[in-house]
Image (cartoon, rainbow, N blue to C red):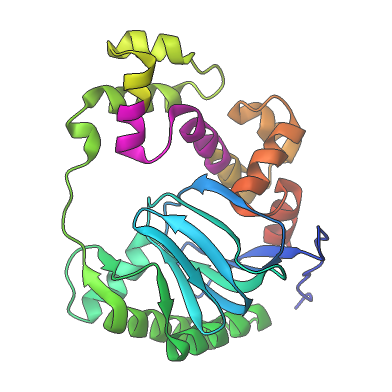
């Protein structure tokens, strides 16, 4: 098997690498060391389960602010808007799983939990769980799919037993303000030529300020940030399929590859070319 590369240079000897984890369906893994990298407010369609191995990460999320060091876990739920940056001058290193809702819900059902699981906290100090998940990550990196998938499922089950809960069904905020959902649909449909805020607000029958407030309440981000997040998500899908960054930038509405790269790094911590290369390599 080809040796995994972990050599994307960056400020303060930063490094980051994504790859597909075939031990859990639809799951990607990240191993990284960040010092000056700061993630913009964004969300994922998957769960994010990060095992901190060195240093301290600090992040904001829907429930407040959290910090985690070695033996700690950074756990973010699907759709939860969050940030991420170093909590100490030397930065932090971590190993991250991005399991789908289906994977985590399936493990939860085996434990007798119903519905889509949630967690009692975002920053969780659980050395036993962190140790199991770190070993799973290392086994995946070494190419042992059976050992890695077994340990990953064990670690997620331990996390759910100790810190999981059945998430209460919440009425989406946009149901109270359908204008926000119409705006979201318009942005998704017009990635290449998005309307101005004035056009969106006129269509919604709200002032620009009122529409921005309603949209942020529904989706955690203002319209322009939601548009860029959607563009990055589409770009990620195309890069997984082997498309080149320059081509992808044009297809999702960014002005050029540099524009795509800037936003891609703010969301994922790596440039799109490196993301595509590492996924193709593994």
Give whichever of 125, 257 is nearer the camera. 125
**Magenta stretch, overall SS:** helix
Count the numbered circles shown: 0
Q: Residue at x 21, y 27 (%)?
A: 177
Q: Quadrant of residue 157?
A: bottom left
Q: Is residue 234 visible?
A: yes
Quarter of the picture holding the C terminus: bottom right
Residue 118: x percent and y percent? 28, 66
Q: Residue at x 49, y 46 (%)?
A: 42
Residue furthest bottom in the image: 128
* Magenta span contains residue 219: yes
Q: Is residue 65 left or right of residue 17?
A: left
172, above or below 89, in the image = above
Give whichever of 213, 169 is nearer the camera. 213
Quarter of the picture holding the N terminus: bottom right
Residue 146: x percent and y percent? 52, 85
Q: Is residue 49 visible?
A: no
Q: Residue at x 40, y 86 (%)?
A: 154
State which region is magenta.
213-233
* Magenta span contains residue 96: no
Q: Quadrant of residue 37?
A: bottom right
Q: Residue at x 42, y 85 (%)?
A: 126
161, above or below 97, in the image = below
Residue 58: x percent and y percent? 54, 64
Residue 63: x percent and y percent? 34, 57
């Amino acid at each position: 098997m080809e040796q995994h590369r972990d050599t994307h240079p960056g400020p303060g000897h930063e490094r980051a690498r994504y790859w597909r984890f075939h031990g859990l369906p639809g799951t990607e893994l990240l191993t990284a060391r960040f010092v000056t990298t700061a993630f913009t407010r964004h969300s994922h369609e998957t769960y994010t389960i990060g095992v901190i191995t060195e240093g301290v990460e600090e992040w904001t999320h829907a429930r407040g602010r959290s910090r985690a060091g070695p033996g700690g876990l950074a756990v973010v739920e699907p759709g939860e808007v969050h940030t991420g940056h170093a909590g100490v001058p030397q930065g932090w290193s971590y190993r991250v799983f991005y399991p789908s809702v289906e994977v985590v819900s399936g493990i939860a059902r085996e434990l007798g939990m119903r519905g889509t699981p949630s967690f009692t906290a975002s920053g969780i100090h659980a050395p036993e769980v962190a140790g199991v998940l770190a070993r799973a990550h290392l086994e995946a990196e070494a190419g042992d799919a059976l050992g890695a998938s077994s340990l990953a499922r064990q670690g997620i089950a331990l996390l759910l037993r100790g810190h999981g809960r059945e998430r209460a069904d919440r009425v989406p905020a946009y149901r109270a303000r359908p204008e926000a959902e119409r705006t979201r649909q318009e942005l998704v449909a017009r990635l290449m030529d998005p309307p101005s805020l004035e056009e969106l607000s006129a269509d919604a029958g709200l002032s620009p300020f009122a529409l921005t407030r309603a949209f942020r309440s529904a989706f955690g981000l203002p319209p322009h940030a939601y548009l860029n997040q959607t563009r990055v998500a589409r770009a990620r899908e195309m890069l997984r399929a082997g498309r080149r960054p320059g081509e992808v930038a044009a297809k999702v509405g960014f002005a050029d590859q540099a524009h795509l790269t800037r936003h891609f790094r703010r969301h994922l911590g790596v440039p799109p070319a490196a993301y595509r290369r590492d996924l193709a390599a593994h």
